[in-house]
């Protein structure tokens, strides 16, 4: 199977739209590899915070991105051998990730790294620009949305479940700010690819959203092969 022949399911959407959980489960159901591209941006954010680099230091942050010693294990993420799974999830890191994601040199530095995840038998990639920039030839592109209120509640619940204190109104404001920043940036803004299927998960359970993506995938494979998937 040549690189381009390896099927990709691209799942994009705003923060807390459920794309991480949905993408992970779709990958498990299909037996595909999984790329959480936001984790790469968060890793670069963490490395830049630790190096004391302000978000405007584009060349230095891009160099960090290019040299990043990242390892993705089942449930844990390592940076230069250190388990940084928890540190990556905090809001400071998420906000910094959104800031450095605006820098073209950083996005460029992460491009090849993301494409390297495309290996047989297939890849489920989730983020903001999987369908528009990183894998424009993805077999299926899904853009997940959900209302800000529902997304803020989901994020709130996730944090509380982990024993982290959170404030619903502040989370909601943060999500809106981050969406606005991700959608307004000039490089790879958050927007559905022209050929993406929009899936609003506001009123869906995770299981329902996963089932819908799998059904879309099977239909797409069936269309490609001209047979019944
Ligand atoms: O999905 P996430 O919240 O972990 O992503 C963190 C930030 O990284 C997000 O605010 C925008 C940025 N990002 C991006 O610009 N492109 C991607 N493909 C993934 C994430």
Image (tube, grey):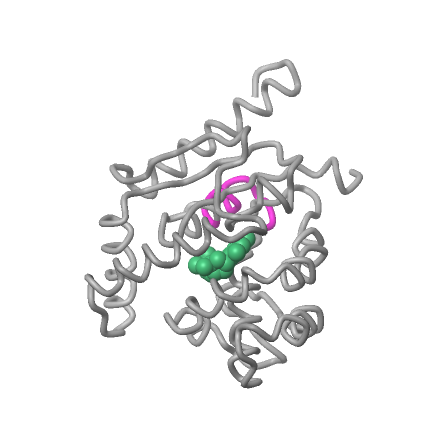
Given residues 91 and 228, the one toward you in this image is 91
x and y, in percent, of residue 197 in the image? 47, 30
From the viewer's perspective, is residue 64 above or below residue 210? below
Q: Main secondary structure of the magenta part?
A: helix
Q: Seen from this angle, which residue lies furthest right?
A: 2
Q: Which quarter of the picture shows residue 143?
A: top left
| Residue beneath the point at 45% across and 34% down | 213
| Residue beneath the point at 57% across and 49% down | 188
x and y, in percent, of residue 109 in the image? 69, 62
| Residue beneath the point at 56% across and 81% down | 53
Query: In the picture, which quadrant includes the N terminus?
Result: top right
Left or right, 217 with reference to 161? right
Left or right, 67 with reference to 143? right
Q: Please tell me whether residue 68 belongs to the stretch shown in magenta.
A: no
Q: Which quarter of the picture shows residue 61?
A: bottom right
**Magenta segment:** 24-33
| Residue beneath the point at 57% across and 40% down | 131
Q: Please tell me whether residue 29 belongs to the stretch shown in magenta.
A: yes
Given residues 110 and 35, the one toward you in this image is 110
x and y, in percent, of residue 85 in the image? 47, 72
From the viewer's perspective, is residue 226 above or below residue 24? above
Q: Which quarter of the picture shows residue 121?
A: top right
The number of discs equals: 0
x and y, in percent, of residue 126 in the image? 52, 49
Left or right, 87 with reference to 64? left
Left or right, 137 with reference to 170? right
């Amino acid at each position: 199977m040549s690189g381009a022949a390896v099927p990709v399911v691209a799942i994009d959407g705003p923060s807390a739209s459920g794309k991480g959980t949905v993408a992970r489960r779709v990958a498990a159901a299909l037996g595909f590899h999984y790329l959480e591209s936001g984790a790469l941006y968060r890793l670069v954010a963490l490395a830049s915070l630790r190096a004391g680099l302000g978000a405007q230091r584009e060349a230095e942050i891009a160099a960090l991105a290019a040299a990043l010693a990242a390892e993705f294990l089942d449930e844990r993420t390592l940076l230069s051998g250190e388990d940084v799974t928890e540190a990556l999830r905090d809001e400071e890191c998420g906000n910094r990730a959104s800031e450095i994601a605006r820098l073209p040199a950083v996005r460029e530095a992460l491009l090849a790294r993301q494409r390297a995840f495309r290996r047989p038998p297939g890849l489920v990639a989730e983020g903001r620009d999987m369908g528009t920039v990183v894998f424009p030839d993805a077999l299926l592109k899904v853009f997940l949305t959900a209302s800000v209120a529902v997304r803020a509640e989901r994020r709130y619940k996730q944090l509380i479940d982990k024993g982290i204190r959170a404030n619903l109104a502040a989370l909601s404001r943060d999500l809106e700010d981050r969406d606005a920043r991700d959608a307004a940036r000039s490089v790879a803004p958050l927007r559905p690819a022209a050929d993406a299927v929009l899936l609003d998960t506001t009123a869906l359970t995770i299981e329902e959203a996963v089932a819908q993506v799998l059904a879309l995938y099977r239909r797409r494979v069936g269309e490609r092969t001209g047979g019944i998937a």
